[in-house]
């Protein structure tokens, strides 16, 4: 096990990823460096295809960098990491299992002690406002509720790092706002480090301590923007804060430049 001197939750050091598909060579990300502190919430935005998902896969150990180093909790990532949580755009629930039993799937795959897993599942069901729906089947749940189940499943084993890849992209605008508020509360209550990939500028700024803006492919860090919103933030009032407008304006400016350069 290789450990570093720092206590970063996630550390990308001059990471580049090149894919070779048939005759085509694609540089997805180039020389990306990023340090994420324990308990921090970092959003990643950038034009389509700039390598956002690739960055999450690197942290999860599902991909290896072509050059550079990736560290998770101080340890170099050399293969799939099981001590993280991962949430995708689609909840990917098993149709025949109730919400609770979908959440408990995580425990079954990990061989967690049953009593502990059940207790944790109940806590998360409560935390995510799913009480009363624990025995419902996925088709009986709204899209937002299905994503809450996916979030509970990802948090069951108390991962110190949660990776979220456009988790609310398939939800309607109002549900998405509600999920943003919920996620912000859950993040504060669990203290988990979160790396969120999103296409929504408002979402990226509302949720994060810092927003990483990437350039068009090959994705490089255009700028890392500190957000600096109050810890407790209502949705509507946050949208009206001058600081929020400044951050989202800057992100839009950078994304505009990135898209114009495509
Ligand atoms: N396994 C792979 N083999 C070959 N090319 C790949 C592979 N995975 C990703 N790519 C390419 O790398 C680039 C970055 O892909 P990635 O999915 O990380 O982008 P993204 O920013 O998450 O995109 P989007 O916002 O559209 O979801 C794209 O050009 C994609 O085609």
Image: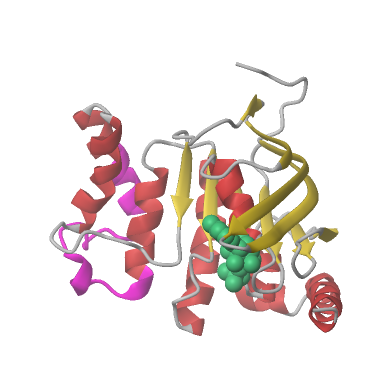
- Image vertical order of residue 53 relative to residue 82, above or below: below
Nearer-the-camera pick, 26 or 136: 26
Q: Which residue does the image show at 76% across and 25% down from the upper left?
A: 6
Answer above or below: position of 209 versus 252: above
Q: Is residue 207 visible?
A: no
Image color mode: secondary structure
Residue depicted at x 16% and y 65%:
137
Pinpoint residue 123: horizontal percent, then vertical percent. Answer: 33, 44
Whether the magenta-drawn stretch holds residue 190 is answered as: no
Residue 126 belongs to the span the image colors magenta: yes
Q: Which residues are magenta?
A: 120-144
Which residue occupies the foreground of this view, 142 or 91? 91
User: Horizontal placement of 157 versus 173: left or right?
Assistant: left
Viewer-closest of 25 and 117: 25
Q: Residue at x 39, y 67 (%)?
A: 90
Residue 57, how many percent across, how many down?
Answer: 56, 49
């Amino acid at each position: 096990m290789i450990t570093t001197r720092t206590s970063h939750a996630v550390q990308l050091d001059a990471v580049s990823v090149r894919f070779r598909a048939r005759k085509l060579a694609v540089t997805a990300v180039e020389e990306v460096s990023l340090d994420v502190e324990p308990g921090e919430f970092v959003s990643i935005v950038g034009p389509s295809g700039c390598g956002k998902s690739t960055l999450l896969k690197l942290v999860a150990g599902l991909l290896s960098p072509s050059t550079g180093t990736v560290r998770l909790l101080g340890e170099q990532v050399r293969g799939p990491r099981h001590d993280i949580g991962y949430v995708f755009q689609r909840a990917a629930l098993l149709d025949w299992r109730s919400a609770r039993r979908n959440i408990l799937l995580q425990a079954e795959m990990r061989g967690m002690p049953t009593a502990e897993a059940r207790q944790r599942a109940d806590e998360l069901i409560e935390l995510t406002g799913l009480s009363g729906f624990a025995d419902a089947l996925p088709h009986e749940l709204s899209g937002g509720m299905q994503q809450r189940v996916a979030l509970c499943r990802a948090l069951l084993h108390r991962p110190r790092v949660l990776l979220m890849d456009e988790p609310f992209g398939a939800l309607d605008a109002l549900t998405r706002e509600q999920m943003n508020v919920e996620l912000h509360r859950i993040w504060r209550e669990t203290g988990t480090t979160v790396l969120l990939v999103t296409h929504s500028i408002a979402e990226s700024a509302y949720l994060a301590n810092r927003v990483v803006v990437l350039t068009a492919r090959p994705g490089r860090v255009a700028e890392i923007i500190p957000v600096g919103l109050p810890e407790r933030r209502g949705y509507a009032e946050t949208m009206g804060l001058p600081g929020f407008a400044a951050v989202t304006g800057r992100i839009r400016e950078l994304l505009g430049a990135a898209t114009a350069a495509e």
